[in-house]
Amino acid sequence: MRKFGKILAVCLLLAGIALSAVSVISNLSYGSATGEIVSTATSEVGFDVHTVKYTVDGVELLGSRMSSGESIGDTITVYYEKSNPSTLVTPSTQLMPIAGAFLVLGVLFSILAFRKKKQ
């Protein structure tokens, strides 16, 4: 059983590290800018679709993004592809909580699996 715990601990730690790295590396290809919501429409499925005016390297761009709780005139942070600033993206922050959970579980299993038994 201790061997399984050690293997599980190492796998959880490696998965946490890998997910963290993937998240950080993918987010490096994004830039950010301050934008202003200039119009809002509701999609067929009920999401608010905002048209956002933002500037990258002195060029004013328009993009759209889905969100809620914001109104025309609000200032928001937008993220765009550095290779194509006219494309707005949502950063992949969803992986970080999962990576954190794997790391915490990996540490806990490491403590349990690698501690020496009292004699």
Image: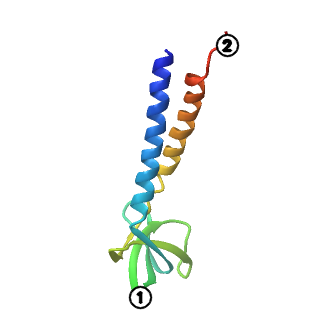
51 sits left or right of 83 in the view: right
Secondary element under disc 1, as helix, strand or loop, is: strand
Task: Give the image location of residue 90, x and y in percent.
Answer: 43, 64
- Is residue 42 visible in the rendered image? The answer is no
Q: CA distance from mark 2 to mark 1?
A: 67 Å
Secondary element under disc 2, as helix, strand or loop, is: loop
- Give whichever of 112, 45 is nearer the camera: 112
Q: Residue at x 45, y 83 (%)?
A: 53
To which quarter of the image does residue 40 belong?
bottom left
Q: Earlier in the sequence, mark 2 or mark 1?
A: 1
Whether residues under marks 2 and 1 lie with C-beta atoms below 8 angstroms apart, the answer is no
To which quarter of the image does residue 48 belong?
bottom left
Which quadrant of the figure contains the C terminus?
Answer: top right
Task: Give the image location of residue 102, x and y in percent.
Answer: 50, 39
Q: Residue furthest bottom?
A: 58
Q: Residue at x 49, y 37 (%)?
A: 13
Q: Which mark is residue 60?
A: 1
Q: Is residue 113 above or below residue 72?
A: above
Task: Give the image location of residue 63, x and y in percent.
Answer: 39, 77
Give the mark toward the camera: 2 or 1. 2
Q: Which mark is residue 118?
A: 2
All told, the count of numbered labels is 2
- Give whichever of 101, 109 is nearer the camera: 109
Q: Residue furthest left?
A: 84
Q: Amino acid at mark 2?
A: Lys
Q: Amino acid at mark 1?
A: Glu
Q: Residue at x 61, y 22 (%)?
A: 115
